[in-house]
Image: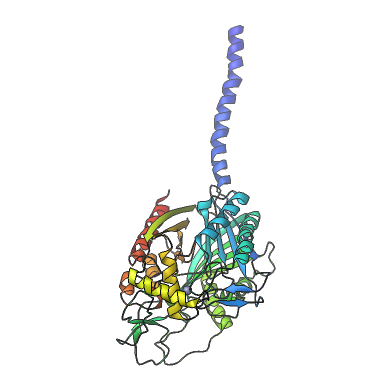
Amino acid sequence: MSFLCRSYGCFPRCLAVLLGVSLALIAVPCALGESKVFRAGAFAIDISPVEFPVIINGGMAERTADKVVDPLHARCLVLDDGASQIALAVVDSCMLPRELVDEVKRLAHAATNIPIDRILISATHTHSAPSSMGCLGSSRDDRYCHFVVPRIAQGIERAQKNLAPAKIGWAVGRDEENVGCRRWRMKPGTAPTNPFGGTTNDQAQMHPGYGNENAIEPLGPVDPEVTVLSLQTVDGRPLAVLANYSMHYVGAPAVSADYFAIFCDKMTKLVGGEASDPPFMAALSNGTSGDTWLLDYTKESRRQFDLDSVATSVANAAFDAYQQIEYQSWAPIVMEEKLLTLAVRLPGADELARAKEVVAALDGKKPTVVPDIYAREAVMLSEMPPTRELKIQAIRLGEMGIVGIPNEVFASTGISIKAETPLQPTMNISLANGSEGYIPPPEQHKLGGYTTWRARTSCLETEAEPKIRAAVLELLARVAAHP
Ligand SMILES: [Zn+2]
């Protein structure tokens, strides 16, 4: 009896164990299935200044503005593949220094728990926004920096709150019309040489203009691609678009987001995102435009353009690509970052002595002309550390790559990364996670010109470009190889 009892008593337990095992086997794929829900959330937070005047940087000399012509935003996107979460923010600013971006990330992490090394924050490079960083003749606007840091972090927090099941897709369009190499080889002795730029007998010049008989040829290629990442709800309603184009900026009266915001408004209309709740968000990040502006000096004469015509053209190219997108219901998210320490080009003792004399003669006034500005830059660089640490990032979204480089990158570098990346397409976002200046390739350094002139915004060693490119490609290979 007791035996039978035990036997019979055992049977239900065995059955239960067997059933439990079976249920577990059924439950495992269910659990995996549940973890494979892809989600996206977006939010564009207004970061327009509220106190005036504000300092505007981006030009040689400092300017100020006392009104908002059109609002500035930090356009934030949070993506989640069920296992990891990342955030991207595209900020209407000329440049965002590393310490400011790091503070935003600390606040965003505290509010969202998204790891600090899974956040990419970039500047659009509008030249009509409050100064978040001292550069050339302009100081940093400290009051605005205190205002904007928590605002960008709040934008990321709001984007995370908007997370909803989504599908993801990407495509690449082209706008050949608005990219021209702004850096030209000139006849010997005709390019200006800056007495405090650290170069001699410059052969390269910015913006030679049309029909300049001293201008020989453009010194680099352009990248006309408009790369588009799109997120839609599961039933096909547009949630967000992150686009990328390699053109410096158009130029606008301050305070303004330049053409970047007009692109976003046009894209919202084109995709039918106007009445969405939560609101549809478009963002246009800057690609590799360190030597690219919108005029092509190989043509006979200057064409007509304005903020609206450029934004329309780039938005139409983005929308052409958008209509080709094939969506995936899930894609893996992998993100890696790397710190790279590079040497700084410093002035020699003689140069520094001459520069100090010029700065002393300014008698505390802000410099406004090129020699004075670069003399002050030489003195400032001599008082800064002899190396800089760069933060470089790569993201994989399915088969797509996104790169964050903290520099103003030449088009040739971007094209080379796109040719060698294992992830197609790859979107190169410049001025991301800091602002470490222009990185002309070594052969361009030899030719001089504005982008090589030594300043806080162009001071990395002449071998910086190949080192940064190698680091980017190493990160892309790493995220691509991730199972
Ligand atoms: Zn620039």
Color scheme of the displayed model: rainbow
Q: Is residue 465 above or below residue 186?
A: above
Could you say which quadrant of the image residue 291 lies in? bottom left
Does residue 171 appear to the left or right of 254 in the view shown?
left
Whether residue 156 is visible, yes or no, is yes
Does residue 49 appear to the left or right of 448 in the view shown?
right
Residue extending farthest top: 1
The image position of residue 75, as x and y in percent, is 60, 64
The image position of residue 141, as x and y in percent, is 59, 68
171 or 432: nearer the viewer: 432
Q: Is residue 214 above or below residue 53?
A: below
Residue at the spot 60% in from the left edge and 65% down from the top edge: 142
Quarter of the image with the N terminus is top right
Residue at the spot 51% in from the left edge and 77% down from the top edge: 59
The image position of residue 391, as x and y in percent, is 45, 57
Whether residue 373 is visible, yes or no, is no
325 or 242: nearer the viewer: 242
The image position of residue 71, as x and y in percent, is 65, 72
265 or 88: nearer the viewer: 88
Does residue 354 appear to the left or right of 62 in the view shown?
left
